[in-house]
Amino acid sequence: MVAEGKCLVRRENLVIFVTQVAPGDVVDLRVTKAKKNFLEAVPTKFHKYSDLRVTPFCEHFGTCGGCKWQHLAYETQLKFKHQQVADTLQRIGKVALPEILPIQASPDQTYYRNKLEYTFSHNGWLTNEQIASGHNYERRVLGFHTPARFDKILDINHCWLQPDPSNQIRLAIRDYALEHDLPFNNLVTQEGFLRNLIIRTANSGDLMVILQCYYAHDALFPLLDYIYERFPQITSLNYVLNDKGNETFHDLEVVCYKGEPYIHEEMEGLRFRVGPKSFYQTNSEGAYNLYKITREFAQLTGSELVYDLYTGAGTIANFVARQAKHVVGVEYVESAVKDAYVNSEINGTTNTEFYAGDMKDVLNAEFIEKHGRPDVIITDPPRAGMHPDVIARLLEMRAPRIVYVSCNPGTQARDLELLDEAYRVVKVQPVDMFPHTHHVENVVLLELK
């Protein structure tokens, strides 16, 4: 098992990356892509199944684009994720590493997500079994993308990722739309009325629904009224009108139709306000594990100045603020910085401040002179990792400790190699936030040499 959840096989000096298999499977392969140094392939026939395999619990496994590791026992998944972190840091980072700590498991392996996005389609994907049956299936669907297909949506009966009433809400909206013959999304021509559905379920019990439509329609408010009446658990019901070429709506108005325009997540006595545009870790209990490790690695005593880079809505900043003297957060998204200030305010946190802007531009000499040289830097960048200019600034600042939180060990390893000029890796802690997928978080503690 190698990167991106694929398996590797070597045959006649060829390297072949294979999807939808497990180590130990004996299969016939069909090559789907040929590159100079490797091939990509999919299985066409299984001659023998691996002893590592278990029976997937979801009826949509293999067709839906998510949860691609359901055919592996969870302990096996953790083993491969730990191996992935070790292999990636050694192969790309090429820096001296301590023994990598055992991977932290997700507290929940099903119903662990607090946010899911579904897409409407007027021409839903049919499985091979459905095609073979000859039945005339309803093609207007509400579900998930099939792998590598932007225009094909699989209707979902039950998703094991998000707790109730997520499934009931999705099915009720789909059935209402069918009953009232509402126009579903055409993903190719980008026409139709119903486009996208987002459901957020907070551990506080709050529940947010966001319905995204291409345009205003006489049926919009009756549909929203129906949802709100059918599911009184909803505390924030919103809609967005979006006729853009993509489903992002950070630059659009989100209208709160019923309830409050936000929900709350809770963690260790703290409350975090989450709006329709807010980022929050999608595994709430897993995020608590991740943040505790981050705080432990930071080794705070109450006297430290902490820089929290890529702070988002200030969740880590507020989480560590009680153990620090002062926390300065920097984030690219301006609306997230507003959320960060709100989160400090509602938690009575007075030793935080936040700044919006491009990290490589904000984190300059004047900024450091104004706020002081940090004792600890916590950095949690996006999948692309840190810009070289940001790394150069970290090397100039020479903070005694850096805690690097990453959702992409590949770019983290690249950055560790650049930081090796001044820092040594002291601890490495993988954390599983996404069971049944190949994704893994990793926390690294660096100390000044």
Image (cartoon, rainbow, N blue to C red):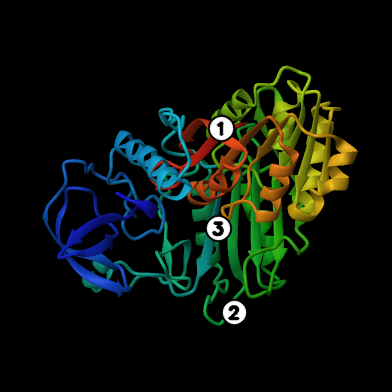
| Amino acid of disc 2 | Glu
How many C-alpha atoms fall within 10 Å of the one at disc 3: few (<14), some, or many (≥20)? some
Q: Residue at x 57, y 74 (%)?
A: 183
Residue 363 or residue 185, whichever sits in front: 363
Query: Considering the numbered disc 3 on the image, is that residue within a helix, a strand or a loop?
Result: helix
Q: Position of residue 328 (x, y in %)?
A: 80, 37
Q: Is residue 135 visible?
A: no
Which is more N-terminal, label 3 or label 2?
Answer: 3
Residue that protrudes farthest toward the top in the picture: 301
Residue 331 or residue 119, whichever sits in front: 331
Q: Is residue 196 left or right of residue 124?
A: right
- Tell me the tag on residue 290: 1
Q: Is residue 193 left or right of residue 162?
A: right
Which image quadrant for residue 305?
A: top right
| Amino acid of disc 3 | Ile
* Whole-number angstrom distance, CA of label 1 to CA of label 2: 41 Å
Which is more N-terminal, label 2 or label 1?
Answer: 2
189, above or below 330, in the image = below
Depth-wise, is mark 1 or mark 2 nearer the camera?
1
Q: Which residue is mark 3?
A: 173
Residue that protrudes farthest toward the left in the picture: 47
396, above or below 47, in the image = above
Query: Considering the numbered disc 2 on the image, is that residue within a helix, a strand or a loop?
Result: loop
